[in-house]
Image (spheres, rainbow, N blue to C red):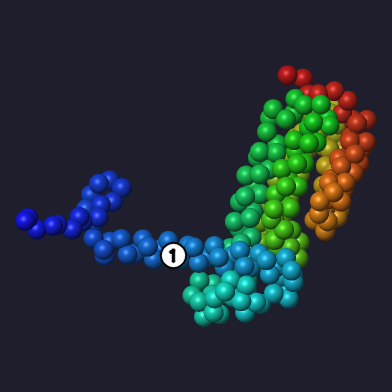
Amino acid sequence: MPESRQTQPTDEKGEKTTEAATAPRRRQARGERRIAQLLQAAAGVFCRTGYAAASTNAIAREAGVSPGTLYQFFPNKEAIAVELGGRLLHDAHEMHGQAFLPENLHKPLPELLDAVLDPVIAFNCENPAFWALMHGSGVPGIQQEHEELHTSLLTRVEDVLRSFCPDSTPAELDLVSNMILGIFKASLDLILATEGAERAAYVAELKAVLLRYLEPMITEPHPL
């Protein structure tokens, strides 16, 4: 009988590879999974205790690993917060892009509020660590990026208002945009602290408040 030959593994291009070549990629994949595990654990700890009271030991326990394993990937709590915050900020920027799509400007005001607010609220509810880090950590790297995100969001809101109220002065647009964000942030505290029907009621109240505030300024959909 002919000798059986062990098939040599190939890469995605069909070229032969060796165990030595694939091992680093496996280690990299394991490392990425471990980092994701640690960040998920950190998100839970930051939400429960706040950033200041959180510790690397608590994060390690949450992840089910030893502190030594955690320190292989992150030197301290701040490094974990910066990495987690950076990823969440990236996702927040993408979410804002979806919320402020140009076609949303052609909707009547109630539908416009739904189109903009629903994804923003959903993102914060699905990522409570985002609120905990952005508003309670005091980590310099996160604070700076959050301020940039806030400025970007303020600009988006001003652009929406400008398209509906072209005669408004820059000072008026700035005032109204800051009021909208202030109302939203105050309401988000209540929304995140509740669940189910109570949360839905607060979301409805937020939309009602903004509708009544903006209706005198915005009475018709943006012209096509």
Q: Name the residue at 62% across, 44% down.
A: 94
Quarter of the rendering occupied by the N terminus: bottom left
For the residue pair 149 and 7, the one nearer the viewer reads as 7
Camera-side residue of 187 and 139? 187
Element assignment for label 1: helix
The answer to whether 182 is drawn above or below residue 115 in the figure is below
**In the rendered view, would you say 119 is above or below 166?**
below
At horizontal 25% and vertical 46% (from top left) the residue drawn is 14
Res 181 visible:
yes
Residue ranking furthest to the top: 224
Task: Give 2 or 216, whichever is nearer the viewer.
Answer: 2
Residue 102 against residue 67 in the figure, above or below: above
Q: Position of residue 101 (x, y in %)?
A: 68, 33
**Residue appearing at x 93%, y 36% in the figure:** 212
- Neighbourhood count class around disc 1 (C-alpha, 10 Å): few under 14, some 14–19, many 20 upward: few
Rendered location of residue 161, percent (x, y): 81, 33
The amino acid pointed to by label 1 is: Arg
| Residue labelled with disc 1 | 30
Looking at this view, name the residue that lies furthest to the left: 1
The picture places residue 170, in percent across and down from the top left corner, at 82, 37
Instruction: Locate residue 127: give its quadrant.
Output: bottom right
From the top left corner, tell me how far across and down residue 158 is, in percent.
78, 38
Tell me the residue at 70%/45% (across/down): 152
User: The C terminus appears in which quarter of the rendering?
Assistant: top right
